[in-house]
Amino acid sequence: MAVREVVERLGLGPCVQIRPVVEDHLPWYVAADAFVLCSDVESLPRTLLEAMAFGLPVAVSAVWGNPEVVRDDENGLLFEPRDLGALGGALQRLLTLTPADRARLGDAARRTVQETHNSSGYIDAYRRMLPRLAADPTLSAMELFQVDPAEQLP
């Protein structure tokens, strides 16, 4: 409700759509021109990785895991958390990017996710972990995910 009130108070109704949560959110990434995440606490949000995988230029707060993935002006834009001026500045930067710069950031974002967060490796990791867990359910997560050099992926 508070977001709706702010949108109405600022006269942004014609420009801002507030939609309910949907089961299939992927079409929204396709329709989006950019992605903004202004959280003040995050580990590494899946939504950020999804937006980057779709090649969107991103502007995100520099909290926790976000700067591990987003490098300012390389594959996205970073701004200080809990700072409305910094958020405004990032939005201004994002909105004034040339089409070529938006494409450059989006392409770099997509490559980052493909190179560093490709989920295909998870299957192999679970194939190695599950037999260990079945053999000894008391193993810690650290022990389960330890990789024997002989088992490392090529």
Image: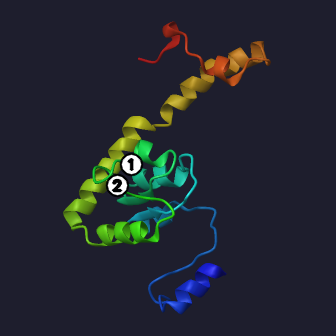
Left or right of residue 117: residue 2 = right
- The picture places residue 24, in percent across and down from the top left corner, at 59, 61
Residue furthest toward the top? Answer: 150
- The picture places residue 84, in percent across and down from the top left corner, at 46, 71
User: Label 1 sits on what residue type?
Assistant: Val
Res. 44 in view = yes
- The picture places residue 103, in percent across and down from the top left corner, at 26, 59
Element under label 1? loop
Q: Residue at x 79, y 19 (%)?
A: 137
Residue 106, numbered circle: none
Q: Quadrant of residue 154?
A: top left
Q: Distance between the residues labelled 1 and 2?
A: 6 Å
Point out the image quarter for the N terminus.
bottom right
Residue 76, numbered circle: 2
Q: Residue at x 21, y 68 (%)?
A: 98
Q: Is 148 drawn above or below residue 41 in the view shown?
A: above
Q: Which residue is drawn at 59% across and 79% down?
A: 3
Left or right of residue 130: residue 15 = left
Name the residue beneath numbered marker 1.
70
User: Label 2 sits on what residue type?
Assistant: Gly
Element under label 2? loop
Nearer-the-camera pick, 85 or 128: 85
- How packed mark 1 is, by other alpha carbons closer than 10 Å (few <14, some 14-19, many 20 or more), is many
Q: Sequence order check: which comes first, mark 1 or mark 2?
A: 1
Nearer-the-camera pick, 93 or 117: 93
Q: Quadrant of residue 9?
A: bottom right
- The picture places residue 126, in percent across and down from the top left corner, at 62, 26
Q: Is 97 drawn above or below residue 77 in the view shown?
A: below
Res. 33 in view = no
